[in-house]
């Protein structure tokens, strides 16, 4: 069981690092003026929203057996 718990923690830490990197890139694109930068910012915003939804998904939580996740509801993507 200790190995399983470590796997869950590693998964959550990995997800957290990815989201932090996305937010850092979003921050660097603040006030973007080129179409390419605006497009990248939109893509990153959608990725953050999707990742947030997946992380809150009861199916994902039950697959890694995190008991306190059982009552969470999947948050759908929002318009950007």
Image: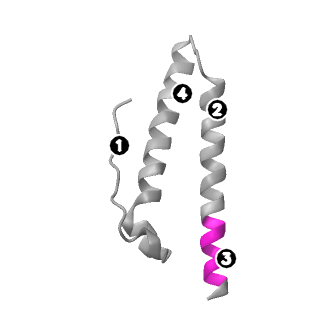
Residue tagged 4: 40
Residue tagged 3: 6
Whether 7 is among the magenta residues is yes
Rendered image quadrant of residue 79 = top left
- Is residue 41 placed above or below 31 in the rendered structure? below
User: In the visual, does 38 lie left or right of 16?
Assistant: left
Q: Earlier in the sequence, mark 1 or mark 4?
A: 4
Q: Which residue is pictured at 57% across the width and 20% down the height?
A: 37
* Discs 4, 3 touching: Cβ within 8 Å: no
Q: Nearer the viewer, residue 39 or 75?
A: 75
Q: In what quadrant of the picture does the N terminus appear?
A: bottom right
* Spatial CA span between label 1 and label 2: 20 Å
* Spatial CA span between label 2 and label 3: 29 Å
Q: Circle 3 — which element?
A: helix
Rendered image quadrant of residue 14 = bottom right
Q: Earlier in the sequence, mark 2 or mark 3?
A: 3
* Discs 2, 4 touching: Cβ within 8 Å: yes
User: In the visual, does 42 lie left or right of 15?
Assistant: left
Q: Circle 2 — which element?
A: helix
Q: Earlier in the sequence, mark 4 or mark 3?
A: 3
Q: Nearer the viewer, residue 70 or 32?
A: 70
Nearer mark to the viewer, of 1 and 4:
1
Whether 23 is among the magenta residues is no
Residue tagged 2: 25
Q: Earlier in the sequence, mark 1 or mark 2?
A: 2
* Spatial CA span between label 1 and label 4: 17 Å
- The residue most toward the bottom is 1
Coordinates of residue 70 in the picture (x, y in percent)? 38, 71
């Amino acid at each position: 069981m200790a190995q399983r718990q470590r796997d869950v923690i590693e998964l959550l830490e990995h997800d957290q690092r990815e989201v932090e990197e996305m937010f850092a890139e979003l921050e660097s694109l603040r006030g973007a003026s080129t179409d390419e930068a605006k497009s990248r910012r939109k893509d990153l915003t959608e990725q953050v929203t999707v990742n947030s939804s997946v992380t809150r998904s009861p199916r994902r939580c039950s697959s890694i057996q995190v008991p306190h996740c059982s009552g969470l509801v999947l948050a759908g993507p929002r318009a950007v």
